[in-house]
Amino acid sequence: MAALVGSQGSDDSLEVAPMADHGSRGGETVQVGGCGPGGGDAAIPAADHGSGGGEAALAADHRSDFPTLSTNHRSSSVNGTLGLGGVTFFIIQGLTNLDEKKIILFSILLLIYIMILGGNGIIIYVALTDPKLNSPLYFFLWNLSFVDMVYTTTTIPNMLSGLLTDISTISVLGCFLQMFFFIQLSVTGRAILTVMAYDRYVAICNPLQYNSIMTRPVRLLLVAGAWGFGTICTLPASVIAFGRPYCGPNVVKHAWCDPSSVRRLVCGDTSLDNIVSLSFAMVALLTTGVFILSSYILIGFSISRMVVAQRLKAFRTCAAHLTVVSISYAAASFVYISYRVGNFSSEERIIVSVLYSALTPFLNPMIYSLRNKELRESIRRTLSRFRPAAVLPTKKISTLS
């Protein structure tokens, strides 16, 4: 499809730039309205220069042959910069049919985001400042809270700003950075949950060797491995997507730069993109899922040989982590099913994705605080330090000289 650029040169002509629809006129440039000496026989006279009514009518007839312009199709010449195949920014469509409900959704999302930052921020603070929380469990827990905070920050602020504006735009580079970190942090969070499952396995199955196994260098290596695993599973698909041509339309039908939604805007074959993305997604999900399941199977065998009192203590140790893992994988499965079921509309799928991205970061602080007595007491001690000291009433004593 062609779009008018509107740059007038010495011959006072309008240039029609080829766009992404690859139609019948997509590969050529047509000169319209050549009124100067360079117009030639192929030029169509413009109506506003009219030397007669017949020429104006002829110009109108020729203009009717061109397709209607679409605001979704943008050329790099419009912005004066060169993007990926012509696109210099993306428009985030978001939820378009909310109207007056946008303010309600904005308030709910803002409250959830504040609670995510507050809850996970408290866990990070107490785990780093309270000397009683120096075990490997809390080291991995504050790393998970940090990942959850950054993970939600990659999407929710953009969604909040999009709810307050009619058109939400994002640069090409910003879109791909958001897409990369959204997937990378999601995989890293699952990898840290896998590391925590291994930590629980060592604590229950080898309690006497726990401190000698889970040393500080080992903990740092495990967390670094989780971040590296997330990067390896995300980088290939992101690099391939960044090298694709995006020549229009530039409207992302999602609440953020979702990889599958951005991939639909590629001007070309995306079979390789789909294969690479799906392959690494399966590697990330199956690898972490198998390791977590194996850890808990071994924990179950070990618990079956314990007495009743030890069993209860072991269950309390694993309860919070097992709850978080169950919610995370159940939510991921529901999102996957919703994307494959045809009864869900595009806006319903966006809502499901938003809830999934905010669910586990929102619930993690509450689950660990309710299930872990040490963490709960540490938070209570920390909050009590920030309370203003009570002012005791003073009694005046008068002395007689």
Image (spheres, rainbow, N blue to C red):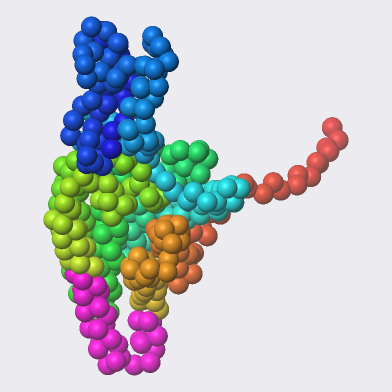
The span picked out in magenta is: 286-315
Q: State whether residue 174 is above or below residue 148.
A: above
Query: Is residue 56 visible to us here?
Result: yes
Using the image, determine if residue 109 lies above or below residue 370. above
Residue at image point 50% right, 38% down? 165
Query: In front here: 381 or 193?
Result: 193
What residue lies at 20% left-to-right and 67% top-to-bottom?
Answer: 282
Q: Is residue 355 visible?
A: no
Quadrant placement of the N terminus:
top left
- Residue 276, image quadrant: bottom left
Q: Residue at x 40, y 85 (%)?
A: 312
Front-lying residue, 140 or 309 = 140
Q: Position of residue 76 (x, y in %)?
A: 26, 29
Coordinates of residue 356 in the picture (x, y in percent): 40, 62
Q: Residue at x 40, y 22 (%)?
A: 57
Q: Name the foreground residue: 157 vs 292.
A: 157
Q: Residue furthest front?
A: 54
Q: Position of residue 189 (x, y in %)?
A: 30, 60
